[in-house]
Amino acid sequence: MKNKKYNAETERLMDLMINSIYTNKEIFLRELISNASDAMDKMYYIALNDDNVKFNHEDYYIRITPDKEKRTITIEDNGVGMTEDELVENLGTIAKSGSLDFKKLNEKNEEHEIIGQFGVGFYSAFMVADEISVLTRSYKEDEAHIWKSKGAKGYTIESGKKDSHGTIITLHLKENSKDEDYDKYLDEYKIRELVSHYSNYISYPIKMEVEKKRPAADSTEDDPKFESYREDDILNSSVPMWRKNKNELKEDDYNNFFRQRHFGFEDPLAHIHISVEGVISFKAILYIPSRRPFDFLNPDRKGGLELYSNGVLIMEKCEDLLPDYLNFVKGVVDSEDISLNISREMLQKTRELQLIKKNIEKKILEELAKILKNDREKYAQFFKNFGISLKSGAYENYGADKDKLKDLFIYTTTKRENITFNEYRKDMAPDQECIYYANGNSIESVKKLPQIKHFMEENIEVLALTDPIDEFVIKMLEEYDDKKFKSISETDATKEEDEKNLDDYVKKMKDILSGEVSSIRENPNLKDDAAYLSSKGEISIEMEKTLSHMPNNQGFKADKVLELNPNHPAVKKLKDMDNDSEEFKNYTELLYDGARLMAGLDIKDPIAYARNVSKLM
Ligand SMILES: Nc1ncnc2c1ncn2[C@@H]1O[C@H](COP(=O)(O)OP(=O)(O)OP(=O)(O)O)[C@@H](O)[C@H]1O
């Protein structure tokens, strides 16, 4: 037996490795399975150039065997195995990846992708084991070797016996402590869970012998009896859906995959299957869900896509693959071209990642445009759920993405439902100067706005903005196809009365309401109501309301204009009153408070308002 010590640096490095690189102990199984898969892939590459080596994919497998009594778990493969020199090279030297060297020497091939590259994954097993032994026989020789180590101090190598090439790695689990239960890794269900979570798409079967029950030979309907027997189960699915050809897959396959991956309970609204080869290669299956997740509006909700590299799960929720405004999209992305960090728990934010993200964004927006064009009802369902995300996309980052999103918005108008800006614009009368919009909680409340009647009579279509974010988006867009957006509640500065020409009664009202409104004017377009509040300038009344609910509310106020209907009896009466009387003051305040209420704003003194109304009655 040969005793070998790691040198001092290696010893320290190993300690760092075992205790600091990984945040999650359970990834040890992923690492050992990936090594086993690499060892079998190597056989494939070798067979390409060596006629003496035959490779038949069906003959290769990985076997996991837990032993509860001995407290060991073994991972076996029938891959290339290692010679004594290779054992020293690969397992005796940290950060030496035999797999990376191998990959450099051999050409890439679509179906066989070697995973290892850093030369550290193997040592992650020391997070759960205090002793590891590796029995291995290289395909090149008949002799087998046993490598054993208890961690940082060193390792031994001795000869062993093994009938065929391959490697059997046995982990002697650490003693349970009050912080960690290592026995769980011996549990059938835990092993199943870990394999299906991290290594489901390894292209070789991962087998485990499990206990099953079947009716016994002497079992009858009246006296059912069962006997136990042991049989191999395959724990992984082998071929990832996204590697299959689109033509082989049916709608049902995509829907089943959506449910299997726990993306949602109901069938998704749409799926997108992407396969890109080029500067960067990746495959993806993405879904637009048909429902909002229950925590959709929770600001701490983590979206993101599942990220695989060569079929091994790297991240469950990778947010860097989607722009924020698409973070409702679910699905998986698999790429061999992404730069992983050493623990495979994180990604380097590289150009490759940016390229995948851009590509995914483009594909999703194209799919949405397609649904919008071909199936308006389906799109309306999507927009009801996730329109708010697209809207925030147009608004955030100083409107950087607004142009790619503006044609995906749909609105209800005073004339029709679910129309795009483009459709509104096309149907505008040639002399209509602006695209008009109005705010309200619903289309019904928009239709009740005092100034809407005028637009209805003139047959001018008005967009109903019913989401608080809508007006912010419209302000960000400013215009669509050369036509400015304009609120029907925005006072036209040019039409505003010159201060000097104001009637005396209006001047007096301005004094009474000083600090509340910046101007008062008569507006004959108001049909049924006596008074109405509009605004001028950047901040509308709707925005004032929305901003007042924000956590960092800085007290933004709209510049308010009180519009009076000169044909309304109440205004006529006010005109005839003595401007200096108490009654005139009361009437003015009543009209103003009424206008505030109609605009959905609070009034300062509800008690005084109610008393005033009662007095009048
Ligand atoms: N089951 C195995 N069969 C044959 N060789 C193996 C096996 N497991 C490990 N090796 C060899 O040991 C080397 C080191 O393995 P280790 O898991 O530490 O790193 P890696 O897989 O190369 O890289 P990474 O850290 O990225 O996983 C591998 O590159 C490979 O050459």
Image: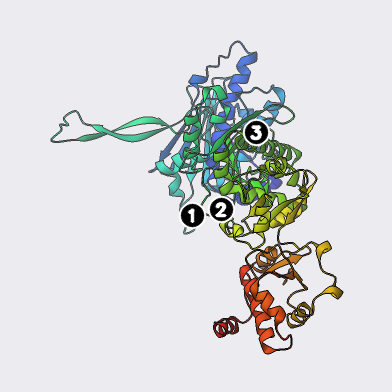
Residue 62 image label: none
Label 3, label 1: how far apart the Cα atoms are: 34 Å
> Which sits in the foreground, 593 or 432?
432
Residue underneath mark 1: 180
Question: How busy is the neighbourhood of tag 1: few (under 14 within 10 Å), some, or many (20 plus)?
Answer: few
Report the side of 264 relative to 242 (left or right).
Answer: left
Image location (x, y in percent) of residue 151 = 58, 45
Image depth: mark 2 or mark 1 in front: 2
Label 2, label 1: how far apart the Cα atoms are: 34 Å
Rendered image quadrant of residue 449: bottom right
Q: Secondary structure at mark 3?
A: loop
Image location (x, y in percent) of residue 138 = 57, 23
Q: Amino acid at mark 1?
A: Glu
Residue 227 showing in the rendered view: yes
Question: How busy is the neighbourhood of tag 2: few (under 14 within 10 Å), some, or many (20 plus)?
Answer: some
Is the residue under label 1 in contact with that under label 2 (CB below 8 Å)? no
Tell me which residue sits at (63%, 53%) in the image. Answer: 464
**Looking at the image, is 10 positioned above or below residue 273?**
below
Rendered image quadrant of residue 226: top left
Colouring scheme applied when the structure was drawn: rainbow
Residue underneath mark 3: 335
Q: Earlier in the sequence, mark 3 or mark 1?
A: 1
Label 2, label 3: how far apart the Cα atoms are: 28 Å
Q: Amino acid at mark 3?
A: Ser
Residue underneath mark 2: 296
Q: Secondary structure at mark 1?
A: loop
Image depth: mark 3 or mark 1 in front: 3
Rendered image quadrant of residue 333: top right
Question: How busy is the neighbourhood of tag 3: few (under 14 within 10 Å), some, or many (20 plus)?
Answer: many
